[in-house]
Image (tube, helix red, strand yellow):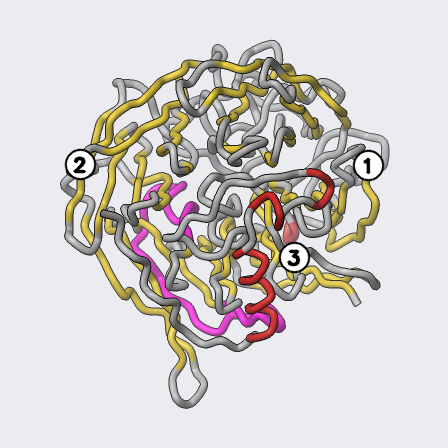
Amino acid sequence: MPRTPARRRGPYRHTAVTFLAALALALTPTAAHSAGGFAPVPPHNPYAGPDGTATMHGDTGSSDTTPLAGPGAGTLGAKRTALASACPTVLAGADGYPVALCTPIFGQVPTVHLLDPDDGSSLAELALTKGSLLGGVYAYIDHEDRLVVADGGNRLLRVGHHRAADGSWTLTVDRSLSLASAVPAGDAVTGLSPDWRGRVWFATGGGVVGTADDTTGTVRALALPAGERVANSISTAPQGTAVTTTHATYLLTAGADGTPRITWRTPYDRGSARKPGLLSWGSGSTPTFFGPASGTEYVTIVDNADDAAHLEVYRSADGARICRVPVLRAAAGPASENSPVAAGRSVFVAGTYGYPYPAVPEGAGDSVPASAGFAGGLTRVDVASDGSGCSPVWDNTLRSAAVPKLSTADGLLRTVLRDPLVPGTGGTSLLDPYRYAEIDPATGTVVRSARVGVGSLYDTLQMAGTITPDGAYLQGTVTGVLRITAG
C-alpha cells in the first residue's frame, strides 16, 4: 500500500503567502489552473513539494507550468546574487525558502545554496561530491521541503535546511542511500523524480533506469538497450515514469519489488549527428506529460531530425503517436534542448539551435555543423480536441535564452531573451543584452519586458526560471541567480 506522506516541517516565515499558495494547490487542476484556458496540468505528486517550484520543470510531470503569479504591476527590476557558479536549478518548498543547486566556475563541485526569500542572498551552502557535467543539475524538493539529489558518488541524498536558535541556517544531509549496486562504474545519475508510492525513480547517462526506496534501502534497476543514453531528466505521472533516451521515449512502471519494466517504447528521428545548440545526439527534451482531461493523457518531446525539429505527441496509455509537427520554422532553427511547456491541449517549444554552450557532456560527439548562429524561435502547437492530430497556432523568432514557464494564475509565459548586440543582426557575443520578458501565450507577442543585464555574467544558458510564492521570478545564470520583481 502507498505510504502516507509525513507532515511538512521547517520554518514558516511567510505564513500568509504560504497559506494562499497551499490553498490554490488544494483545488482541483481544472478549477485552480484555468487562466488563459490552459488547463488542466498534471496532478500533484504527494511525495513532491509544491507544484510550480518542486522541480526544474515545475512539477513531476515536467509541464513547466506554475500556479503562482509572477511579478505584478510596477517597474520591473532585477538583482543578481553573485555565487561564482552556474545555477541551473532553483526550487522552493512549502516554507517559501528557495534552494539553488549550483556548479562553481572553479572546481565545479556541485553546491547547494539556501537563499533568503526576501533578497535572494545565500543563507547557507553545502558542497556535494563532484560527478559528471549533468550531475548536480536535476533534483527536486520533496514533501518535507528537502532537496533530493544524486551526488557524484552515486548516493541518493535528501538535503534539509534547519534554523538554529540564534537565527543562523545550516544545510545537512538528512538521509542517504547508495545507488552503487545499480549504477555501473563510470556511469552517473542524470535525472530523478518520485512516483506515487514514494519511491525515487532515477536514470543514468548510460541508460540504466531504477527505483530507490530510501526508507527500506531497496534499489532495483533495468538496463535499457545498449547504446541508448539518457541526457535529460525524467518525468513521473500516475501512469508511470517517462524517459527519453537518445533513441526513443519510454513509459515504465515498477513490479511489486520495485523492478522497472517497460510498458511501451516509441522511437523518434534522432538525426545523423548532434546539432549545435544541443547537448546530446538525440532529443533535448525531458518528456512532458499533459492533456485536456487528467493533465497526463499525452507525453511530448521534440525530435532531432536533420531537416527540422518536430514536436512529437504520444498517448500515455500505449505510446501511439498522435502527431509529428514541424516547429521553429520562422526562426529556421531546427533544434531544441529545452523541455516542451504544456497545459491542457497546448504545447510551447523554445528553440536552442546554435546556442553557445561553454561545454557539452563527455561522449556527446561533435556537432554538425561545428557551429551556427543562435536562431531561437518559439512555437505553439495545439492538439485537436478529439485527439486526432495537432496544428501549429503561432510561430515566432524570439530568442529565448531560458526554459519558458507558463503561469496558469496570470496566463503569461515568462522567459529571458538574449537579444543581439546590434539590433536586427544574428549571432551572439560576450556583450549581448539579456531581457526578462512576459509573453501572451495566445499570440506569442511580448507584452512586457525589461533589460536585466548586459554581458556574459548574465548568460541564462537555457536554464529554467522559477516563480516564488511572493511573485519574484528567480532565474539561474552562469554566475549566480537573478531575482526579478516589480513595484
State the residue at coordinates (29%, 39%). 188
Report whether 182 appears left or right of 422.
Answer: left
Three-letter residue code for mark 3: Tyr
Query: Which part of the image, by quadrant, shows the C terminus?
Result: bottom right
Say few, some or many: other residues with alpha carbon within 10 Å of mark 1 (under 14 / 14 to 19 / 20 or more): some
Query: Is residue 431 or residue 51 the one in the foreground?
Result: 51
Q: Earlier in the sequence, mark 3 or mark 1?
A: 1
Across and down, in percent, residue 455 comes to 70, 49
Res. 256 mark: 2
Across and down, in percent, residue 473 comes to 65, 57
Query: Is residue 12 or residue 77 the one in the foreground?
Result: 12
| Callout 3: SS | strand
Across and down, in percent, residue 68 comes to 63, 55
Res. 473 mark: 3
Three-letter residue code for mark 1: Thr
Image quadrant in which you'd find residue 441: top right
What secondary structure predominates along the stretch shown in magenta?
loop
Image quadrant in which you'd find residue 234: top left
Q: Is residue 460 above or below residue 389?
A: below
Q: Earlier in the sequence, mark 1 or mark 2?
A: 2
State the residue at coordinates (76%, 20%). 330
Three-letter residue code for mark 2: Ala
Residue of label 1: 445
| Callout 2: SS | loop
The residue range painted magenta reads 115-140
